[in-house]
């Protein structure tokens, strides 16, 4: 039996999760809910997806544009076993009431507060704790990237303390009205930024402080990490070895000409990914340095894509379909997630 999945909110994240769901052999896409009958709705229909409107007025808008509409969001919810809610941050609480009334499971995204579900998810860190849950929050892009690497380092060497400076992309590529044009914006000025506390919603024992800056780019976030490890005998090659064997981490090297987030993003195009998506943490292996027992490295996070595999794994965990290892492996195979460039 396939799990019936509906997507509420068909923007940056919703579109990608819908495509990823339709690639899974144990899931079926019920449809997607769109507010406006725009080109994204038209293209969803051309993929064979059923499109639902947010409300009755929305149905009228679709009819006026002569786009087929399968009903409202409540019709979509009725047909689904689980809803992946990818509406903008803070819309989640009212939608949660709708899902709860219909006795459905739901996944929310990182723009919502941890308290909305009381459980925040990153597959490699806490898959087993999500087994059977009704509501799960998949954490934000930056938190997902940080949890993957800190969990790997902590399991192998012990993390004493992590300090991270995040250069954040100011806007996603289609957000034409947002973001600084000629400035680096302290985000926020008072410290720490919210990212460290958010990591603790998944890895409560990790000692972490984060600072963030918004920079005028749309492609990726760039993290500069400084990590004190408990094991003081660690050398750089040992760290590279751990990352090589951690799922969803891709080591790249500046000697191959990958010297910026633009080059990292270009990899997505060159390896033929839909929408140039990079699901992996990009880590520059030649930045990995140990000095005075502290580990330093640079890491890129493609904000639009990194949480997509986590949404798929969260669905499997909530329906107890597979073990963590098997689910991660299945998701990685379906999305062609890489562990090396070749
Ligand atoms: P988005 O604005 O690109 O997409 C949201 C979509 O939901 C839009 O199409 C909007 O029209 C629609 N929508 C708004 N209200 C709705 C409603 N009531 N019912 C149905 N649809 C509705 O947003 P996004 O970037 O995809 O973000 C979605 C969530 O994912 C947020 O919680 C965000 O914080 C999180 N997230 C975003 C990114 C990112 O970089 N874009 C990365 C990780 C997590």
Image (cartoon, helix red, strand yellow):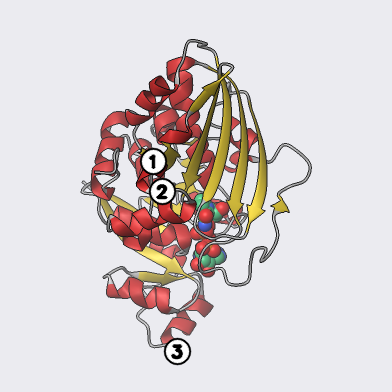
Which of the numbered marks, if any, corresponds to residue 258? 2
Q: Residues within 10 Å of mark 2 (few under 14, many from 20)?
A: some
Judge whether residue 35 can be spotted in this image. Answer: yes
Q: Position of residue 169 (x, y in %)?
A: 57, 55
Separation of residues labelled 1 and 2 (CA atoms): 6 Å
Labels 1 & 2 near each other (Cβ < 8 A): yes
Q: Residue at x 52, y 42 (%)?
A: 139
Foreground: 85 or 260? 260
Image height check: is 250 above or below 207?
below
Quadrant the C terminus occupies: top left
Q: Residue at x 44, y 19 (%)?
A: 155
Which picture quadrant has residue 312? top left
Name the residue that disc number 1 marks. 253
Mark sitting earlier along the chain (1/3): 3
Foreground: 184 or 122? 184
Q: Position of residue 285 (x, y in %)?
A: 41, 34
Dot in front, 2 or 3: 2
Ligand 1 within 8 Å of the CB at mark 3: no
Label 3: state its secondary structure. Answer: helix
Q: Residues within 10 Å of mark 1 (few under 14, many from 20)?
A: some
Labels 1 & 3 near each other (Cβ < 8 A): no
Mark sitting earlier along the chain (1/2): 1
Name the residue that disc number 3 marks. 64
Which of the numbered marks, if any, corresponds to residue 71? none
Q: Residue at x 28, y 54 (%)?
A: 271
């Amino acid at each position: 039996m396939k799990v019936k999945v509906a997507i509420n909110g068909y923007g940056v994240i919703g579109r990608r999760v819908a495509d990823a769901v339709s690639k899974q052999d144990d899931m079926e896409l019920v449809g997607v809910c769109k507010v406006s009958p725009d080109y994204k709705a038209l293209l969803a229909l051309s993929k064979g997806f059923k499109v639902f409107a947010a409300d009755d007025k929305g149905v009228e808008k679709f009819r006026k544009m002569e786009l087929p509409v399968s009903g409202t969001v409540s019709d979509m919810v009725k047909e689904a076993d689980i809803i992946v809610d990818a509406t903008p941050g803070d819309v989640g609480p009212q939608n949660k009431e709708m899902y709860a009334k219909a006795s459905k499971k739901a996944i929310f995204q990182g723009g919502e507060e941890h308290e909305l579900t009381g459980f925040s998810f990153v597959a490699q860190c806490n898959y087993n704790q999500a087994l059977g849950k009704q509501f799960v929050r998949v954490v934000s892009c930056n938190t997902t990237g940080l949890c993957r690497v800190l969990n790997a380092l902590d399991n192998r060497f012990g993390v004493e303390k992590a300090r991270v400076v995040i250069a954040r992309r100011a806007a996603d590529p289609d957000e034409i009205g947002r973001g600084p044009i000629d400035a680096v914006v302290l985000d926020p000025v008072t410290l720490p930024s919210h990212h460290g506390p958010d990591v603790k919603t998944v890895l409560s024992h990790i000692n972490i402080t984060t600072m963030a800056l918004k920079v005028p780019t749309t492609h990726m976030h760039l993290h500069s990490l400084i990590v004190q490890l408990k094991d003081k005998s660690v050398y750089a090659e040992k760290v590279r070895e751990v990352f090589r064997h951690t799922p969803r981490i891709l080591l790249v090297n500046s000697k191959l000409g990958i010297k910026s987030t633009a080059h990292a993003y270009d990899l997505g195009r060159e390896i033929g990914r839909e929408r140039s998506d990079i699901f992996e943490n990009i880590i520059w292996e030649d930045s990995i340095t140990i000095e005075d027992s502290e580990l330093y490295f640079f890491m890129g996070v493609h904000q639009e894509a990194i949480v997509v595999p986590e949404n798929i794994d969260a669905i499997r965990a909530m329906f107890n379909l597979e073990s963590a290892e098997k689910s991660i492996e299945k998701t990685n195979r379906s999305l062609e997630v890489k562990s090396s460039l070749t």
